[in-house]
Amino acid sequence: MKHFYLFILFTVLFYFSAYSQKPELITQEENLGVITNIIYSPNGRYIASANAKDFNIKIWDVQSSKLIGTLAKHQSAITSFAFHPSGNLLFSSDKKNYMFVWDLNKWEMKDSIKGAEQILNSKFTMDGIDIIATTNKNNLIKINPNKLVKTPPSIDLNGVATDLSIYGDLCAVAVNKKEVVIIDLEVFSEKKRFKSIKKEDLKYVEWIN
């Protein structure tokens, strides 16, 4: 039987000089301020980016290296976004607890709602059926992208989540109490909790083959 192992990266601190070169994603258009989030779509077609000075998500075409669209419904700083495995949908959240689902084929908002918690990190499951997200209330929530609700199903992580990684029906969540929590996504319940022997807080977690 093939085994998969959890790869844990410990605290990594990056120091940026105030005099360092201002980051630019693509030369065709300058971003306003420092880029705060950037992700590739799973199909390799798009890059999505957000920055510190406006509330928009910019979508870039990888092949042409050009800005092809701006998603502009958020009214506060964007906290997370995630591509559907197909690359045709994008989920996003902001500091005022709003959640959005965007149709990138039609370039329009598909759904939106103000949630009960602020989302810190989000990822689609590998089959694209659900979105798994961590929140500022130390919860892990499961979001249906086809029907957003204010209070989706949740699991108490008993600590602030710093990262999450999904493989199949399992989700690994790094918690700042030097723990990794394994979640069974099929039944959406805690399966196992590992305690780190290191002094540093866990910052990143990833499944590796």
Image (tube, grey):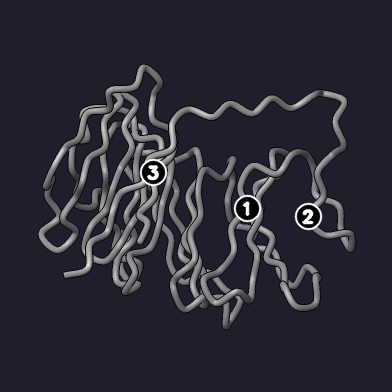
Furthest toward the bottom, the residue is 105
Q: Nearer the viewer, residue 162 or 141?
A: 162
Q: Nearer the viewer, residue 58 or 98?
A: 58
Q: Which residue is mark 1?
A: 38
Q: Residue at x 37, y 56 (%)?
A: 208
Residue 1, percent from left and from top = 16, 70
Give SS at disc 2. loop
Give SS at disc 3. strand
| Callout 1 touching callout 2 (CB < 8 Å) | yes
Local packing at callout 2 (Cα closer than 10 Å; few below 14, some 14-19, many 20+) is some
Q: CA distance from mark 1 to mark 3?
A: 18 Å
Q: Amino acid at mark 2?
A: Leu
Q: Which residue is mark 3?
A: 205
Residue 177, percent from left and from top = 29, 23
Q: Residue at x 54, y 29 (%)?
A: 12
Among the two numbered marks 1 and 3 on one chain, the one whose residue lies closer to the N terminus: 1
Where residue 158 sits, quadrant-wise, is top left
Q: Which-is-in-front pick, marks 1 and 3?
A: 3
Q: CA distance from mark 3 to mark 2?
A: 26 Å
Examine the rendered structure and indicate whether residue 168 appears above or below residue 137. below
Q: Amino acid at mark 3?
A: Val
Q: CA distance from mark 1 to mark 2?
A: 9 Å
Q: Amino acid at mark 1?
A: Ile
Q: Nearer the viewer, residue 80 or 166?
A: 166
